[in-house]
Amino acid sequence: MGAVYINIVFIFVLMFLGYYLTYKGWFNDTVGDAFSKLVLQIALPSSMFLTITRNFTQAEFLELAKGTIVPLVSMLLTFVVSFIYIKVFKLAVSRRGIFSTAFTCSNTIFIGLPINYAIFGSRAIPFALLYYIVNTTLFWTVGIYLIASDNPQFTKEKVQFNPLVALKKIFSPALGGFMLGVTWVLIQLPLPESVTTFLAYLANLTTPLSMFIIGIIVYGVGITKLSLDKEIIGVLVGRYLISPLLVWAVGQFITVPPLMLSVFIIQAAMPMQNSIPILARSYQADQKFAASSLGYSVLLYLLYIPVLLKIML
């Protein structure tokens, strides 16, 4: 347990280092964008490929895909709970789409992946990616629709959803690395040691760069500008209570391996999806609410994760 906490502390030290270096002017949004591309298009696909080829057999893959039903059902239920919260607490119409999306969709890559790796090791990565696939699919379909609907200038008929954009987000290079690794294992191709070493160099960039990105985002939000209200409290309740509880509850009815369910619970209990403020700005929705929700969800996570681990481990 102590080693797990130390690993997580060091991960957040990287985040604060990213925050500090942004404050000092070393990093900025442009650097953050470059880091994001490097992680999503190079480092993470390399990590996915290596994890699959090193840790899994053909038989294990036959059971792997079945697990997607747990995050799918639990996230749809979480959306439903968010709609109930909106009705009960009479949230502002201009914030409802952002609220439901933040309530339901988590940061499965930049925070979820490093945290799961720190807790469970490399065997957790494919399970984390399964949750990522479902999370990303719902975010770029249901989520983007709801966020765009917050703008009164957009009627439901005018909300533009481009299926090609959504597919590009879902079938990302990270998923490509995952699928290539699966293919490699299924056809039992040998992997030269020199190639493994090269890919390991790239894969090792994933965690530090991911946390630098979060540090840049938190600095951009501005800690001193954060404001707490009932909508943000609701987002935090959704992220850190409702979402993981529903994953656990669904897992009691749909049998999956214990490690898979644990990874799903950790993924569900992550800060909100960091693309939400960007989409809020794009659709001229309430960007300040989206940014404040992101800032609070990331900062509160520092206090929340030890409690969650105490319960689970």
Image (cartoon, rainbow, N blue to C red):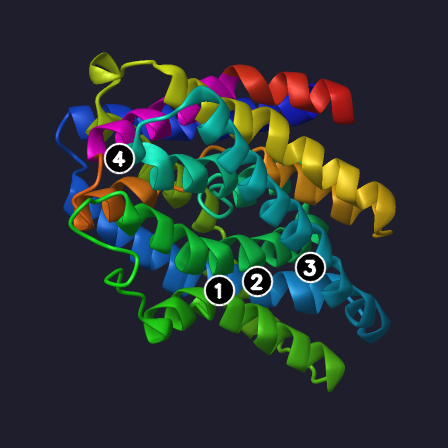
Picture coordinates of residue 104 (x, y %)?
Answer: 51, 40
- What type is the residue that disc 3 sits on? Thr
Location of mark 4 (residue): 94
Dot 3: element: helix
Task: Give the crowd class for mark 2: few <14, some 14-19, many >=20 residues within 10 Å.
Answer: many
Is residue 1 visible in the rendered image? The answer is no
Query: Considering depth in this image, is 28 or 77 the residue closer to the camera?
Result: 77
- Give the vertical position of 221 relative to 195 (above or below): above
Q: How many marks?
A: 4
Residue placed under numbered mark 1 in the picture: 174
* Residue 42 position within the rendered picture, expressed as x and y whole percent measured from the top left: 40, 64
User: Which of disc 4 and disc 3 is earlier in sequence?
Assistant: 3
The earlier-in-sequence mark between 2 and 3 is 2
**Residue at (21, 22) in percent of width and height:** 222
The disc, 1 or 4, on the residue closer to the chain's N-terminal end is: 4
Q: Position of residue 195 (x, y in %)?
A: 54, 73
For disc 2, the marked residue is: 48
CB contact under 8 Å: marks 1 and 4: no
The quadrant in which residue 95 appears is top left
The kind of secondary structure element at disc 4 is: helix
Judged by depth in the image, the label closer to the viewer, 2 or 1, is 1
How far apart are labels 2 and 1 at the CA level?
7 Å
Magenta stretch mostly in which secondary structure?
A: helix
- Residue 297 visible here: yes
Q: Is label 2 in a helix, a strand or a loop?
A: helix
Residue 133: where, in percent of width, then height? 55, 60
Name the kind of residue labelled 1 in the image. Ala
- Tell me the magenta residue range: 287-302
